[in-house]
Amino acid sequence: MTKTYDITTIDGDGIGPEVCQSAVAVLREACGSRLRFDAQPGGAAHYLRSGAVLPDETLAACRQSHASLHGAAGLPEVTYPDGTEVGNDLHLQLRFKLDLFANVRPIRLYKGVQSPLRDWTAGQIDYVIVRENTEGLYASRGAGINLRGELATDTLVVTRKGVERVAKFAFELSRRRSGAPRDGQRRVTVCDKANILRSYAFFRAVFDEVGAAYPDVQRDYAYADAITVHMLKKPDFYDVIVAENMFGDIISDLGAGTVGGLGIAASAELGETHGLFQGAHGSAPDIAGQNLASPVATVLSGALMLRWLADRHGDAALGEDATRVERAVEAVLAEGVTVPRDLGGDASCTAMTEAICRALL
Ligand code: ATP
């Protein structure tokens, strides 16, 4: 019997609803009735209306469904009294409450997309950033100290369990890939500042302990500042990069920039039992509600969702659907006729969605 999957969707704010609904349309086209979508509220606008950025019912739906798909959340003017943005709390709470410890961000240059880096073509940039997603500096969100308005601190948290599981994830991922484009070598690079802070030296030491069990995967080391240069000068060297939460956040935007920008960068946030899928970008309020956003990042995140579900449930057909969605996006980008605005074209969010659906057929 064909297995069906319950997917919780949270549109969110800004371009969130446009890109989330685009991904739903593509996934419906690809999978038909095997996916059952359940839309739940959440985000900064919902917080203004109800006082909850992540309502209990939405959290419960995410817990109970097979996977969650999210547009983006956040409105710059909607902040907590401490000045931090309310919208980010939606996915931050989901990360912590569902224990989504590995944030997987593929950095891949597609045919038809011009990298701002000279001379790099499709296939030559193809690596994955695995961002530790539940601790690091962001573990202090909402818990830092602001003393008398004179002193403020946040604490960087690194635990053995936290590094072990994300490092293991990175090494396992490398084993499933075919190595770095430059030399075919399976390689996991740890991005840290082990030369400056004990927390990062500990991160690196635990990474090494875990890596010792993977003699077929090369261990590589890069400081967070230096890697920003390497990612521009030798992007083909990378296979999998694992990083502490904040460093992973920063370098994944840089990586996205090298392959066309935030509108193309997918993201999967994975734990032992749950997965949350959304583009790596935020809610982009500057272009919201105008049908200008590129849905590509969210659609590709939807493909990551299908692949994750396929692996978890041993569902080969769903795995094929994941490949079909990716190929459809690839075909549209390679053809160069329907091109989203952030990649130099004039295709609306709707036009991109329709083109991807057509390519699926
Ligand atoms: P956050 O901190 O929540 O990640 P941010 O402040 O980094 O958000 P984003 O919302 O990610 O900002 O977007 C930065 C800019 O990139 C936007 O203002 C927009 O111009 C562009 N952008 C982001 N996503 C898209 C998209 N899907 N399509 C087109 N342009 C985008």
Image (cartoon, rainbow, N blue to C red):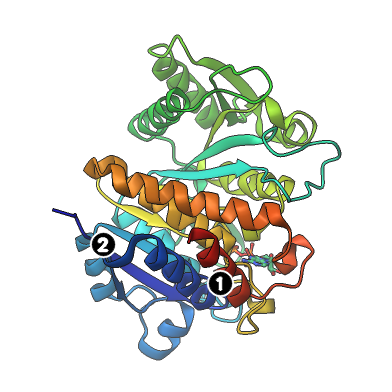
Q: Amino acid at mark 1?
A: Glu
The quarter holding residue 55 reads: bottom left
- Element type at mark 1: helix
Frontmost residue, 9 versus 42: 9
Give the numbered dot on residue 354: 1
The quarter holding residue 76 reads: bottom right
Residue 195 in sight from this viewpoint:
no
Tell me residue 90's x, y (percent).
41, 67
Tell me residue 4's x, y (percent).
21, 59
Whichever of callouts 2 and 1 sits on the residue coming sooner in the sequence is 2
Tell me residue 134's x, y (percent).
40, 47
**Residue 201 vertical placement versus 358 (above, below):** above
Residue depicted at 62% across the width and 63% down the height:
150
Residue that lies at the very extreme toward the bottom in this rendered image: 49
Frontmost residue, 135 versus 221: 221
Frontmost residue, 257 versus 2: 2
Q: Amino acid at mark 2?
A: Arg
Residue 61 in sight from this viewpoint:
yes
Residue depicted at 53% across the width and 66% down the height:
358
Residue depicted at 49% across the width and 27% down the height:
177
Residue depicted at 54% across the width and 16% down the height:
219
* Residue on which the image places disc 2: 34
